[in-house]
Image (cartoon, grey):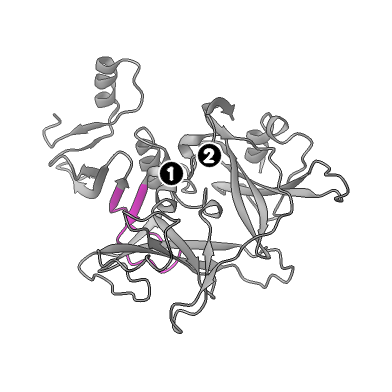
Amino acid sequence: ETWIAEVLLEKLPLILPDVTLYMSPNDQSNMPFAHLLGWIENPTQGDIPFTHTLKEVVVSYNPPVVTVFNVKEYGRRHLRTLEYTSNMSLCLHEVAGEPYPDRVGGVLAMSGGIPMTTVSPEPSLVITRALTSEMGTQTLIPSRFMAGLIPACLVDKYIFWQSEDDNLVGYEIPKDTSIEADATDIGADTQSSTRLKIKLTKANGVDNSGFCNTAANAMIQRFAVVDLDEESENIDKNRPILTLLNVVTAPAGSLLKQIGMLLSRLDNLSQVLVWSQSEVQNAQQACSIDFIELPRVNLSFRAKRVEKIDGSVEHRLYSNDNDGLYIATSNKARGIMEKLLGSIDHFIVLQNEDND
């Protein structure tokens, strides 16, 4: 696990001074990321006994990124709130505040947030509903607890409710309705819509501590429905079910990681969605890369496997907005454009079959 120490060696004393971090005894040497936990003492508040804030630190291997969450009690459950990232471009959420340049593991990037924030005990309001007997009781998960776990463009587009089996459903927010709209209005529209299903696959063993210590993987799928009625699930069978792929936790050197790093030139990964049309059964299953969306810059691409004349295979990302053009990945194409554009870094090159 020397890679974890190398990433944190110079950075940890600056962002979490005097904090001791602990990690799982499992072998982390070949993992693309590692979870560590530590706590800091909260400022004293009069007669209130001293309290602590539990910090969860996620360290990514390549590129090296440090992300800090606060673990907050909400409705007798422990949930995360994103507080800091060392690389805004590679984080799944854009932390509030003005970004500032920072360096981790020799990589210079724009950091965001304040890692030393603390959490004080406070009341929490839990909202539940029971639309139908089949759906059972659902609990509203505020968007702040989803930040940093899934891409921000999905957090902004859906309202998330957790079912009794701990799985979550994301209901699309009508385009003319804000989150603060009356609950009786949501679902009354009959527009076509999409819905997210987040299935949690929990690790073996039972957590008897009551502190949410059971690890789990999440599989996120998006499917189309013919209307916004949240009491029904009238799936549009003419549109495919898509499974979201996680660029952030993809192994270094993998095709998924390479595509994610390429697209991060156009927008932060919080605004990049990589989808697969494969029939995925669990979060560990290998699958194809089929469709990519960058909603903030209004771009999308479709993946295609091309066999060239010499027998080699090339994976191309064809633009849905520019017919016949796909993303050029050669150093030659980028070198030509760098000579024309100068110091502009955030661009990609599109080319056609004739290499134009």
Is residue 96 at all visible to an observer of this figure? yes
Disc 2 marks which amino acid? Val
Residue 114 placement (x, y as % from top left): 63, 35
Residue 133 sits above or below residue 73 on the image:
below
| Image height of 177 relative to 115, above or below | below
Which residue bears the numbered disc 2?
95
Residue 258: horizontal and vertical position, in percent?
38, 40
Q: Which mark is residue 270?
A: 1
Is 68 on the left-hand or right-hand side of 88?
right
* Residue 25 position within the rendered picture, expressed as x and y whole percent measured from the top left: 71, 55
Q: Say which of 105 and 39 sits in front.
A: 39
x, y percent for residue 246: 44, 51
Q: Are marks 2 and 1 in contact (CB under 8 Å)?
A: no
Task: Name which residue type carries label 1.
Answer: Ser
Residue extending farthest to the left is: 354
Residue at disc 2, secondary structure: loop
Question: Which stretch is magenta?
Answer: 273-292
Query: Number of labelled discs?
Result: 2
